[in-house]
């Protein structure tokens, strides 16, 4: 139990520790990662912008029964995660489409990249985030944040933000209901799931965000027709596990075929 306790407490196994593949060890690891009373992320930093998108183009990226909201917007962000409870320090960038599923408002993630595969695996398998590996730069210089995302030699995102005044509240990033697709690999049944996280805001500020979006065959972000940012923000938060993923519908094979180049390349 000494080894398990050491791993569970710090989240980072020692260099000489190897898994023993016991049920007790696995259970301790799951409890550490998914305890709703303990932080999963600390001091997570986000530079984000809410931007208009081409409604028809965005609807083609959505599963059946899910459509763009009335305002036809997306949240686009780059994040820096300096501490996690699952032995992974990494950066991330994503597009969350602001959608409606029946009468319910939600977010759908059609594109997301990380720079550490330890963050890729559970995000894809458990939460339906179609994560891929990319190169992500994040730099802070006083009141300015610069972020660049490249994949396969193509610059996909360039965001910069001059930090402004504190604000009381903003549209959430992860602390909201999602409609993501899981079960896209193997013989499982593809399904739509919903979930959310619990976030503790540490700092929220307005930001004068400039945004440049590129694209490639495997990451055709430019097809979404992003407009100029409507709002921009910088935020620091602690994050905990929230509502576990719950199925809310099935996904047609047509959606999987249409989105295969984006999700699997």
Image (cartoon, rainbow, N blue to C red):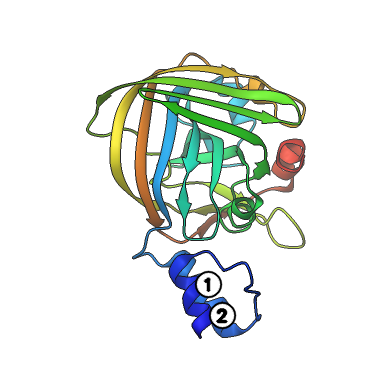
The residue indicated by pointer 1 is 29
Looking at the image, which residue sits at the far top? 228
The disc at residue 25 is: 2
Question: CB under 8 Å between callouts 1 and 2?
Answer: yes
In depth, the one of 215 and 166 nearer the eye is: 166
| Left or right: residue 95 compared with residue 177 | right
- Residue placed at 47% from the left, 72% from the top? 8
- Residue placed at 56% from the left, 80% from the top? 25
| Left or right: residue 82 compared with residue 183 | left
> Could you tell me residue 73's position as x and y percent?
47, 25
Disc 1 crowd, CA 10 A, few/some/many (<14, 14-19, 20+): some
In depth, the one of 18 and 244 nearer the eye is: 18
Residue at mark 1 to residue at mark 2: CA–CA distance: 6 Å
The part of the image, by quadrant, that contains residue 40 is bottom left
In depth, the one of 201 and 136 nearer the eye is: 136
Disc 2 crowd, CA 10 A, few/some/many (<14, 14-19, 20+): some
> Could you tell me residue 211's position as x and y percent?
52, 18
> Could you tell me residue 14's position as x and y percent?
57, 68
The part of the image, by quadrant, that contains residue 92 is top right
What is the secondary structure assignment of the residue under circle 1?
A: helix
> Could you tell me residue 205's position as x and y percent?
30, 28
């Amino acid at each position: 139990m000494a080894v398990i306790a050491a791993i569970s407490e710090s989240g980072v196994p020692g260099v000489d520790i190897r898994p023993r593949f016991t049920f007790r060890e696995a259970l301790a690891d799951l409890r550490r990662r998914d305890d709703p009373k303990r932080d999963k992320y600390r001091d997570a930093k986000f530079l984000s912008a809410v931007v208009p998108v081409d409604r028809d183009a965005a609807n083609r990226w959505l599963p059946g029964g899910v459509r763009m909201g009335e305002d036809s917007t997306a949240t686009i962000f780059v994040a820096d995660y300096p501490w996690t409870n699952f032995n992974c320090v990494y950066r991330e960038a994503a597009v969350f489409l602001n959608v409606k599923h029946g009468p319910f408002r939600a977010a759908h993630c059609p594109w997301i990249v990380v720079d550490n595969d330890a963050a890729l695996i559970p995000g894809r398998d458990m939460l339906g985030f179609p994560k891929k590996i990319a190169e992500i730069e994040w730099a802070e210089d006083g009141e300015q944040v610069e972020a660049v995302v490249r994949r396969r030699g193509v610059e996909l995102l360039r965001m910069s933000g001059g930090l402004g005044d504190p604000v009381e509240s903003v549209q959430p990033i992860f602390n909201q209901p999602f409609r993501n697709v899981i079960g896209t690999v193997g013989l499982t049944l593809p399904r739509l799931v919903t979930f959310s996280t619990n976030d503790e805001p540490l700092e929220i500020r307005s930001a004068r965000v400039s945004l440049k979006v590129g694209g490639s065959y495997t990451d055709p972000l430019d097809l979404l027709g992003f407009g100029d940012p409507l709002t921009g923000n910088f935020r620091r938060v602690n994050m905990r596990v929230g509502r576990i993923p719950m199925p809310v519908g099935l996904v047609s094979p047509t959606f999987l075929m249409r989105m295969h180049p984006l999700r699997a390349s």
